[in-house]
Image: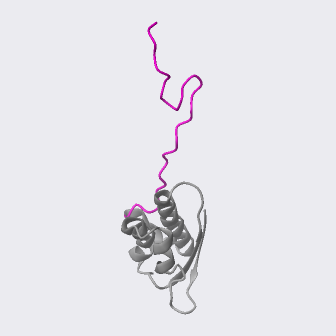
Amino acid sequence: MLCLVGMSEFGRNEMRFELLREYLQGNPLWIQYVKVPLATLGYESSYDVFVKAHGGGLSGQAQAISLGIARALLKVSEDHRVPLRKEGLLTRDARVVERKKVGLKKARKAPQFSKR
């Protein structure tokens, strides 16, 4: 995922929440995920945010965007670490899909057992 955060030239948020709302299908929880890092530091309209996310579902992308914005704000100033860490915005969700094993249909699903 690519996340660029820069100072806003015109005091507007380039992440335009209309486009964000359209992309995240109007789901208020996903939109909230994306807004939290900027709102935590009080920068809702101070930065332009450009994001390119791919892979996974929209929920995972919303959380990845949140992490990307938090990490980008951390590069702006190291003083942001404490409030972002306190909100849990710098922690990556380490869960990944379990691999398929040989002889099984999926990661844990075995073929039907036949006694005879």
Choose between 61 and 115: the one closer to the eye: 115
76 falls in the magenta region? no
Q: Indicate the colouring scheme.
A: one colour
Name the main secondary structure of what is drawn in magenta.
loop
Residue 10: percent from left, percent from top:
55, 93
Taking the magenta stretch, the answer to whether it contains residue 110 is yes
**Residue at screen point 52% across, 44% down:** 96
Residue 108 in the image: x percent, y percent? 48, 29
Tell me where residue 75 appears, x and y as whole percent.
Answer: 57, 71
Residue found at the far bottom of this picture? 10
Q: Nearer the viewer, residue 113 or 10?
A: 113
Residue ranking furthest to the top: 116
Q: Residue at x 46, y 79 (%)?
A: 17
> Residue at point 60% right, 25% down?
102
- Quadrant of res 25: bottom left
Residue at the spot x=48%, y=46% of the render? 95
The magenta segment is 87-116
- For this rendering, which residue is in front, 29 or 6? 29
Q: Name the quadrant of the N terminus.
A: bottom right
**Place of residue 70 in the rendered image (x, y in percent of width and height, measured from the top left):** 49, 68
Count how many numbered circles sit on residues in the image: 0
Taking the view exactly as shown, the residue that stands out farthest to the front is: 116
As drawn, 87 above or below 4: above
Picture layout, residue 27 above or below residue 8:
above
